[in-house]
Each structure stands twice: as structure tokens, then as C-alpha cells.
Amino acid sequence: MAALLVLVSAILVVAAWGRPVALDGLRALHVLQLEEYQTARFWRWLSTHPPAALDAPFVATLAVATVAVWLLPTPIWVIACAVAFLVGIRQSLRSKAPEAKKPLVLTARARRLLAGWAVCEVAVALLAWAVIRGPLGSAASAPVPSILSAVTVAGAMCWPLMSLGNLLVYPVEAGFRRYYLSSARAVLRRHRPVVIGVAGSYGKTSTKSILAQILSTRYPALATPRSFNTPMGLCRVIREQLRPEHRYFVAELGAYRRGEVRQLCRLVIPTVGVLTAVGPEHLERFGSMENVVKAEFELIEALPPDGVAIFNGEDPTCRELAAKARCRYVLAGGDADDHRAIWAEDVVLTSAGLGFILCLADGRRAPVSTRLLGRHNVSNILVASAAALEAGLGLDDVAAAIPRLEPVEHRLQLVPNENGVVVIDDTYNSNPRGAATALETLAAFQGGRRYLVTPGMIELADLQDAAHREFGRQAARVCDGIILIGPRQTRAIAEGLAEAGFPDQRLIVARSLDEATVHLRGLLQRGDAVLFENDLPDQYNE
């Protein structure tokens, strides 16, 4: 009877804590997914967020219950187990999946990883049980403390075991990866579209969208949606969306390290390459600007001898790289002595959009206007127009398409609202150049006060603090009020604001976007403008 009592007690305690542990596993999976299933980045996150990776109430409660069953007489350990059970029930009722800006998506890969994690949890629990069970010998209550101890060990290792599960399912994922790559290549060979690759540190998604919109006025064209710029993202688009009627396929090519653009080019085999800009990006992963330059140039190196490379002539690094192209190249924008093929004159930046004269080297001119905001979009339109002209469109076709261009989501996008406040959404992946352009755009709104809400920029390595201070100095010249999100993340921005003499009473430091939004509600009036510059992923929350 006593043995049955202790066994039932152990089972009840473990069952009560099952849901909190399962939610911990889902949180770990969420972070791993946000870190693109990269084990090294997952562990780097764990090293900076140790409290999040350990369920202290779980470990403490089960440890106390284990010791009580192991050492104390029956009436006391029964009470200890009852308390552990009630605490577990309370935690289970209180625990809920955390709200997230980018929620966990239970894709097929995520489900396989979850299964791998569960296998690791069971294996560690069994190993711990076997190790602990031995020294206890044949004591009557031996199964209970060994079970509780095993579950405590497995639960405490919940987050590390998620990374182990990731390694466990890696061979399976590699097999799926090979299959999808082979299948996508077969689809491309069957449909044979002209592939235009778009690479660069900034402006890839906007340029890709602009080019696809211009091409689509004359030819059926498919562009990768949003930021589907990884091997598996491209495979998914090719396999699910590419059709025989698509004459052009515009593929955004992303990279975090050298060799990744080359790998993407082996998949899609571009004959036209567009390099939008080269600058500080993902330096924590690339390691140096030299690696960034070499990585982005891989697109140009992959082009065939009869291909064409299109460079943003406004970008000094792009101009230098153009001379190294082994195929014909075109400069879009830049100085007259750079032999540019297309450029803009008389650029006008307003709160309603952009206006300029589109100029070709043969002397033809076309005045154009667009609802797109931001001076950087002039460069994006120029390189996209150059690619469209190479595809066979005429100047009249391009000029007619530009006024109909739709803004890309979260990139200097005006958000409609009914309260008379201008909301500028520039929350996708901020960088030093883009942030400066966004502030210039905010300055064009003159009807009321101008506010900035930002968590700053990330992955700039040693350049980050300097970039943040400069951003702060720039913002001080434009903004009437500023809300920084994340005290640690935005410390250098605040220093830049102070250096520029920005009044302390007009600066608010919030811990989350929700808190910042609450502050805004009490500040904004009709006619004001607010710029949301960048929105960091959930793993950067402070």
C-alpha cells in the first residue's frame, strides 16, 4: 500500500507539471525558429538570457519533493508531494504561450524538431533514472525519488535538449533539403524563365518588388514574396508558384555568410544580376566588411559571359565592383563620368512621394512621380528600370509603370488611420543608410510635431554603438519627441541624442512596443507624424 501511495504521488506531481514543461519546450522551439534553426545562434541567445532558459519554480518544487520522499517519514513527504502537486496545478493554470510579434509556426520541420526534442527528453530522463536508481538499492520508496529526480533533470535541461534535438534531426532535414532543391531545379528546367537575381546589403526586397511590378505591365513575371531569399524559401516559391507562362522570375538572394549567394545562384542560375548596395549588414555573422563585399559580389561572379550585371551607381562600393564584372554591366545612377546608362535629375522629395526626371544615356528623358517615400527609392527605381529596359521594355513603358508602383509592406509605408496622425511604418530590418533616409522622409511632414519610435539596429558588431550614436544625432535634428525601446539596446542612441542637445523631457525609454504605444496615445494629436523605425524580433526583447 505504501509503495502504491508513493507511486501515485509521484505520477500526480509529474502530471501537474507536464503543461509548464511542454510550454517551455515550445518557447525553446520558438527561439530556435527565430534564430533560423542555427544551434550556435541559439546558444548565444541562451548565454545572454539564462533566466529564460530555466524554469526555477519547476526545478525547486520537484527538488524539494524528491528530497522529502527520499529522506522524510511518510506523513511529511506526502504533504510535500501534495504541495508540489498543487503548485504544479497553479503553474499549469497560469502558464500560457507568450504573445509574440512573430509567433511560432508549427511547420513540418518544427514538428519534426519537436519530436526530436521529446526523444531527447525521454532519453535523458531514463538515463537519470538509471543513474539515480542504482544507489538507492531496494528501498521501498526508491522508485519515487528516482522518478522525480529524473523528471527534474530532464525538465531543467529542456532548452539545451532542444538544440540536441536539432542536431538529432539534422540528417533528416538534410535529406528533405536535397529533395526540395532537386525538385525546384527540375521545375526551373521545365519552365525555363529568364531569372533575374537581386542581391545587396539593402534595398533587395523593395527593388525586387519594383522590378516585378514594372515587368508585369508587359510580361508575366513572378517575384519571390516578402523575404523568401533562402534556399528553402526559393524552393518553395519555385515549386508552388512558378508556372509555364512566367517569362521572368525575379529572385531575391539573401546571405549571412560567404558562399550563400553562390549556393542560391547554383539553384536559380540567373542571367541578369542586380546589385542594390553594399554596406554594413549582419556583421556579427559575416565577420567583416570584406566578407560582405565578397559575398554580395558572388551574384555577379555567377552570371554567364553573355549575361548582364546592373549596379547601383550611387553606391561607391558598387561602382568599384562594376569594373570587376566579367560580363557586360550597366550603371544606374551615379556621376556622369562613370558612364552611367540611366540616372535621375531634379529629384523632389515630399510627404506625398517622389518626383524626378528619368534620364537615359541616349538623351531621352521622361518626368515621373511615385507614391513611394524616401530618397533611397530613387536608386531602387533606377536599378529596377535598368533591368526592365534590358528585358525589352521601352522608356515609355517604364515611365508609365512608375506612378502605379505600390509600396512594399513595412518599408516607409504610410498606414491609413482615422485620427489624423501620419503613421510611417519602416519596421523591417533597419540599417544606417535606411534609418537616415527614414528620418529625412519624416522631416518632409511639416504639418505638426514629428515623433520617432525605435529599438535601434542590430547585427552591426563593433560598428553598432557608433551607428546608434550617429542615428541619435540625426534624430535630434528632426524629431520633436522620441521613444526608444529597450534601455540596453538603445543606450548609444540616447548618448547621441544627448550629444546633440536633445531635451531629456522629450525622450522616453520604454521596455516594449506595447509600452511605447501607450505613451504615444497620450502624446499624438491630429496633424502629427510618427515614424516607427525597425521592429526587433521577439528574441531581442528586454
Image: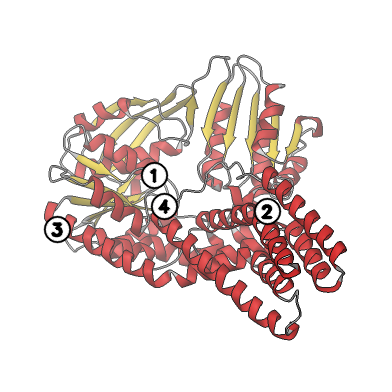
Specify the amino acid type for callout 4. Thr
Above-or-below relation of 16 to 126: above
The reply to whether residue 502 is in sight is yes
Badge 2 density bin: few <14, some 14–19, many ≥20, Cα 10 Å: many
Above-or-below relation of 393 to 32: above
Q: In screen coordinates, is 385 left or right of 297?
A: left
In the rendering, at what x and y percent does residue 165 appear? 51, 68
Q: Earlier in the sequence, mark 2 or mark 3?
A: 2
Give the number of callouts. 4
**What is the number of the mark on residue 16?**
2
Q: Which of 380 and 333 is in front in this view?
A: 380
Determine which quarter of the picture holds residue 124: bottom right
Q: Name the residue under label 4.
A: 107
**What is the number of the mark on residue 205?**
1
Above-or-below relation of 420 to 369: above
In the rendering, at what x and y percent does residue 302 appear? 27, 64
Q: In screen coordinates, is 408 left or right of 455?
A: left
User: Contact (CB < 8 A) between labels 2 and 3?
Assistant: no
Q: Earlier in the sequence, mark 4 or mark 3?
A: 4
| Residue drawn at point x = 75 percent, y = 46 percent | 495
| Residue reaching furthest to the front | 1
Q: In screen coordinates, is 288 left or right of 482?
A: left
Looking at the rendered image, the disc whose residue lies closer to the viewer, 4 or 3, is 4
State the separation of the CA atoms marked 3 and 1.
25 Å
Q: Mark 3 points at which residue?
A: 189
* Mark 4, secondary structure of its residue: loop
Badge 3 density bin: few <14, some 14–19, many ≥20, Cα 10 Å: few
Specify the amino acid type for callout 2. Ala
Q: Nearer the viewer, residue 274 or 483?
A: 483
Q: Earlier in the sequence, mark 2 or mark 4?
A: 2
* Mark 3, secondary structure of its residue: helix
